[in-house]
Image (cartoon, helix red, strand yellow):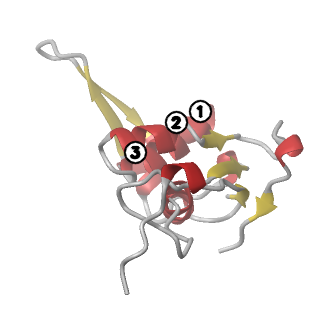
């Protein structure tokens, strides 16, 4: 008996909706990253892009546990001396909760071309509404 290897042409992608309201941001990001990679399917093959589309709604209502709102920072560097920019997660969750969720999910994907293409299939919305009803997405509970 040989090991099954999924072919790129045979991949059937599904659409899933995840409701992040009242759920921890990290837990929601883990579930979304697994769906984007296709790890929930029995045909999962690590070197083939066999993931699904994921829509995350209510990202603004996701919670950070503990003292992360005050103590956790998003940092980026311009490349120049003294160019470190830090933003507190309290401000990010108030102004751009979609960015916080996208950053968390992208950090859990592989750092290669498979991860970059999987990240393009992620759609994040701060509120309840999304414009992907034509794709007939399934609700994913975790």
**Residue at mark 3 to residue at mark 2: CA–CA distance:** 24 Å
Q: Are marks 1 and 2 in contact (CB under 8 Å)?
A: yes
In the image, 60 versus 120, the foreground residue is 120
Q: State the SS at label 1.
A: loop
In the image, 62 versus 4, the foreground residue is 4
**Residue at mark 1 to residue at mark 2: CA–CA distance:** 5 Å
Q: In this view, which residue lies farthest toward the front?
A: 1
Q: Residue at x 29, y 28 (%)?
A: 76
Left-right relation of 12 to 30 = right
Please determine whether, in this image, residue 134 is positioned above or below residue 66.
above
Q: Are marks 3 and 2 in contact (CB under 8 Å)?
A: no
Pointer 1: what residue? Answer: 96
Q: Is residue 90 visible?
A: no
Q: Quadrant of residue 97?
A: top right
Mark 3 or mark 1, earlier in chain: 1
Q: Nearer the viewer, mark 3 or mark 1?
A: 3
Q: Residue at x 31, y 33 (%)?
A: 75
Q: Which mark is residue 115?
A: 3
| Picture coordinates of residue 22, whole percent (x, y) | 68, 64
Mark 3 or mark 2, earlier in chain: 2
Please determine whether, in this image, residue 87 is positioned above or below residue 19.
above
Q: Is residue 74 visible?
A: yes
Mark 2 closeness class: few <14, some 14–19, many ≥20 residues within 10 Å:
some
Q: Quadrant of residue 111?
A: top left
| Picture coordinates of residue 87, whole percent (x, y) | 39, 32
Left-right relation of 42 to 13 = left
**Residue at mark 3 to residue at mark 1: CA–CA distance:** 23 Å
| Picture coordinates of residue 64, whole percent (x, y) | 52, 58
Q: State the SS at label 2.
A: helix
């Amino acid at each position: 008996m040989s090991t099954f290897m999924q072919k790129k042409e045979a991949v059937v992608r599904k659409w899933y909706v995840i409701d992040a309201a009242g759920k921890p941001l990290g837990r929601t990001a883990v579930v979304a990253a697994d769906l984007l990679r296709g790890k929930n399917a029995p045909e999962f093959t690590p070197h083939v892009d066999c993931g699904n589309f994921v829509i995350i709604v209510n990202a603004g209502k996701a919670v950070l546990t503990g003292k992360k709102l005050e103590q956790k920072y998003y940092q980026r560097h311009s490349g120049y001396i003294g160019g470190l920019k830090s933003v507190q997660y309290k401000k990010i969750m108030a102004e751009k909760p979609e960015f916080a969720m996208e950053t968390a999910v992208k950090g859990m994907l592989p750092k290669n071309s498979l991860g970059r293409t999987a990240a393009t299939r992620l759609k994040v919305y701060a509120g309840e509404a999304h414009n992907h009803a034509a794709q007939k997405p399934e609700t994913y509970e975790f």
